[in-house]
Amino acid sequence: MFSAQEIFILRKENALLKTANTKLKSSVASKNQKADKLEEENRQLKDELKKVKEELEKIKKQRDTYKGMIFKPNVSHKPEEDGYYQPPEVLVRKELGGQNGHKGKSRGLPQRVDQTKRVFFHHCPNCGNPLGRTDSIDTHTVEDIPALSETKTIVTKYESERQWCGHCGKEVAAIPAEVIPHSRLGINLTIQILIWKYACRMPLGIIVSTLNQTYGLTLTSGAVVDILKRVKEWFGVEYQNLLKIIRGSPVKHADETGWRIKGLNGYLWAFLTKDTCYYTIEETRGGGVAKAVLENSSKDDVLVRDDYSGYKNLPLNQQACWVHLLRVAKELVKAEGSSKQMKLLYQSLCEVFATLAVVTNIPFNQKERMLIYQVCSSLFQTIIKEPNTPSDVRAIQTRLNNQQKEDHNNYLTALLYDNVPLDNNLAERGVRPAVIVRKISGGSRSNLGAETFAVNMSIIQTIKMRNQPLIPTLHSLILKGALGNTE
């Protein structure tokens, strides 16, 4: 038995141990709370870091996309990389300068010689002795422009006689040939301004300065703008003819890009065939623009375009651009953490594209094309319906599914029609000149300025696409419009 004193001591020690244990539990609980809090903060930081990385990846993709839209460097084909197939458009840069095996080309002699100048000495340049003439010569042909110091404007005063016809009893007055009615500036000057503005993409201030320094002609920027606006009116009938050609073409292309009007966001739309270009600048990117431009087109026509949904509901057959599809697939393959399924899918798409590229570039054989169409269509359905796929594969599945219309996929339309390309490069190239102008000017300062650019640029680009002589063609169209000859 314990004595009373021993029991007292044991109880006291027990109480002290309980107190220490309580403090220890409290300390452990506090530390556990801090640990939980730190773990939660760490989880949140990881989530934020993941979001930042995803956002950075999106920004990089956007940057690369915009660079690819504007700058497309010369490149050469590299068949394989990183263990998966590379399609023809997934390319590597060429070395700068002349390529191995490339045949050099020098400037040939002019076909026309306007003047011949004989150069000789009267006295020897070394000793001063008189020299006789000789028939032995060396030739050197030089092609140059007129001396700028002598290039001035030509001012012509026309005097139209007021003549009387005794037979019909009327007064008549001759109209000067090749002169723009009611204009104090000549047609050659107008053509030069058009070429500088739309073919050379010169800003108004540079045009004004160049006219003054080259020809001694003083014009204001406002005067140049007025000339461009008048030309727009003269080109009006021809501009509408371009629209009729676009609507009547069995194969047409479309694309759009941003264009600021009075500092506000608008859009430049481009509609093209192989030899015709039609621009229109609108305040919206809505599908109603494409519908209005392409109204009255035949339902059998084919519209080649990118994946923008604004074209989706147009009552036309549509070919979606393969370049856009493969570019997106390539970006997903190159992305960090790309799945093995995505690489296999990318390889399949490349193989399908290679097959289509061959088939669509040989004479049209309906039986052969229908067989390939059925195989490719079945493959697309398998890809779209594949379950439990990674997120990168689902992105391609969604893209393919968005182009599915009932039992047809818009990526395969080119198999069903002759002379339909698999890509929308024609429209991409058609938009590029306008994009360069936009980078220089920033857009248009008014709705009338935007309309003027669309009309005049459409005419210039169409002339270039048709390989017509620029100056004579502009000369004819301007006089035709200015004189009201709509035939």
Image (spheres, rainbow, N blue to C red):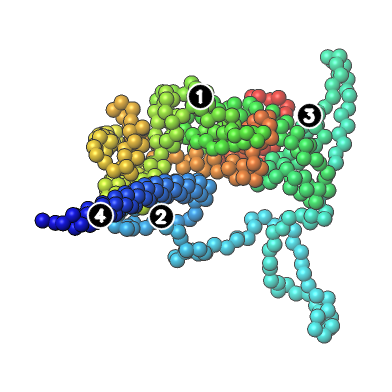
- Disc number placed over residue 116 in the picture, else none: none
Q: Residue at x 68, y 32 (%)?
A: 446
Secondary structure state at the residue bearing disc 1: helix
Q: Distance of mark 3 from mark 4, alpha carbons?
A: 121 Å
Residue pointed to by mark 1: 288
480 over 147 or under it: above or below: above
Q: Distance of mark 4 from mark 2, alpha carbons?
A: 85 Å
- Disc number placed over residue 91 in the picture, else none: 2
Q: Residue at x 76, y 38 (%)?
A: 224
Q: Find residue 81 and report its horizontal and vertical position in percent.
A: 33, 58
Q: Find residue 239 and report its horizontal and vertical position in percent.
A: 61, 29
Q: Amino acid at mark 4?
A: Lys
Q: Quadrant of the N terminus?
A: bottom left
10 Å neighbourhood of mark 1: few (<14), some, or many (≥20)? Answer: some
Q: Is residue 336 visible?
A: yes
Q: Distance of mark 3 from mark 2, alpha carbons?
A: 55 Å
Secondary structure state at the residue bearing disc 3: loop
Q: Find residue 481 and report its horizontal and vertical position in percent.
A: 69, 28
In the rendered structure, the answer to whether residue 26 lies left or right of residue 296 reads left
Residue pointed to by mark 4: 12
Name the residue furthest left. Answer: 1
Taking depth in this image into account, of 322 and 398 the one nearest to the observer is 398
Q: Distance of mark 1 from mark 3, alpha carbons?
A: 39 Å
